[in-house]
Image (tube, helix red, strand yellow):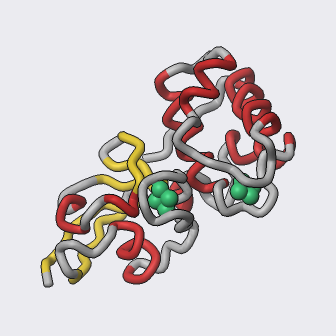
Amino acid sequence: MSTIKITINGQPQTVEAPPMKRLLDVLREDLHLTGTKEGCGEGECGSCSVLMNGELVNSCLVPALQADGARICTIEGVSTQGRLHPIQQCFLERGGAQCGICTPGMILAAHYLLEKYPQPTLLQIQEGLAGNLCRCTGYIRIFDAVQQAAILGKTGAAE
Ligand code: FES
Ligand code: FES
């Protein structure tokens, strides 16, 4: 077991975990943050995306020890005081979420994208979300939601 110290959504946390335990499992099992979803478990689908030190990562590929000392933002850290983040609101209004498995990762990927490109082109949105797979929506509504969030110009602060 290793002692892992991480800052999750602004809160310092200490977890005792095997060093190779996946960050995804640390989040879901040890910290009960079940908003982060598992899809493929192999780094292919993006369902487990979180922000680690401001970078978008697949938490199924990050060993717990690698996250020691890191700042992590999960979907639970995106809304504030029980209010949806504007990106979440746009997903809701534009039908960007159906079954919801991809949605937390998609929201974090969109957040990361809009931090880099506040006014992205459609191509930049498509490329920025290329690592996040959705089996339900056909993507059009997701791209539409991200475009709407960009128009509103409210990326907010997720960490
Ligand atoms: S569950 Fe991590 S990338 Fe699919
Ligand atoms: S909403 Fe179902 S996988 Fe995207």
Image-based side of 145 in relation to 35, left or right: right
For the question of whether residue 115 can be seen, the reply is: yes
| Residue 86 to residue 153: above or below | below
Can you give x and y, in whole percent of width and height, for residue 20 in the image?
Answer: 21, 72
Image-based side of 89 in relation to 62, left or right: right
Residue 15: quadrant of the picture:
bottom left
| Residue 101 to residue 118: above or below | below
| Residue 136 to residue 119: above or below | below
Image-based side of 123 in relation to 36, left or right: right
Screen quadrant of the N terminus: bottom left
- Is residue 48 or residue 81 the one in the foreground? 48
Image point 35% across, 75% down: which residue? Answer: 26
Residue occupying the far left of the picture: 2
Image point 64% across, 56% down: which residue? Answer: 102
Image point 18% across, 66% down: which residue? Answer: 65
Can you give x and y, in whole percent of width and height, for residue 73 in the image?
Answer: 43, 54
Callout count:
0
- Ligand 2 sits in quadrant: bottom right
Can you give x and y, in whole percent of width and height, for residue 6 in the image?
Answer: 26, 64
- Is residue 33 or residue 7 the one in the foreground? 33
- Is residue 101 or residue 3 the one in the foreground? 101
Image-based side of 40 in relation to 70, left or right: right
Image point 62% across, 59% down: which residue? Answer: 81
For the question of whether residue 156 can be seen, the reply is: no
